[in-house]
Image: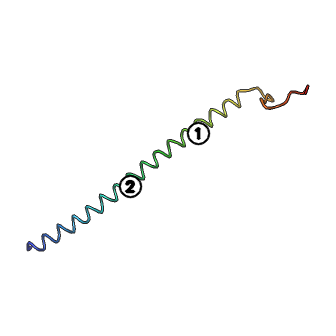
Amino acid sequence: MTEHELNSRVEVLEFRLAHQEAAIEELTRTVLAQEQQVGEQAETIRRLEAQIRSLTSSPPGAQEDEIPPHY
């Protein structure tokens, strides 16, 4: 193998490595964004569960916004 062929192969490998590093960076950003989104969704679910629990813990027929019958 000549020095020129060896240099050419090294250049090809460096080119592929650079593209793979860029792809890994993009995938990392995507995973981090999805992790943040999943965290936000989990927090929303926790808040909704708390709201549902508070609604189901009140006695049936007792609504805070309902006007008492004597009005």
Q: For the N terminus, which image quadrant?
A: bottom left
Residue picked out by circle 2? 27
Residue picked out by circle 1? 45
x and y, in percent, of residue 25 in the image:
34, 54
Question: Label for residue 18?
Answer: none
Q: Is residue 27 above or below residue 13?
A: above
Q: For the C terminus, which image quadrant?
A: top right
Tag 2's secondary structure?
helix
Image quadrant assignment for residue 47: top right
- Is 17 left or right of 54, judged from the image as shown? left
Residue drawn 91% across the image and 25% down it = 70
* Residue lying farthest to the front in this orientation: 71
User: Mark 2: which amino acid?
Assistant: Leu
x and y, in percent, of residue 14 in the image:
21, 64
Residue drawn 86% across the image and 27% down it = 68
Residue drawn 82% across the image and 31% down it = 66
Image quadrant assignment for residue 57: top right
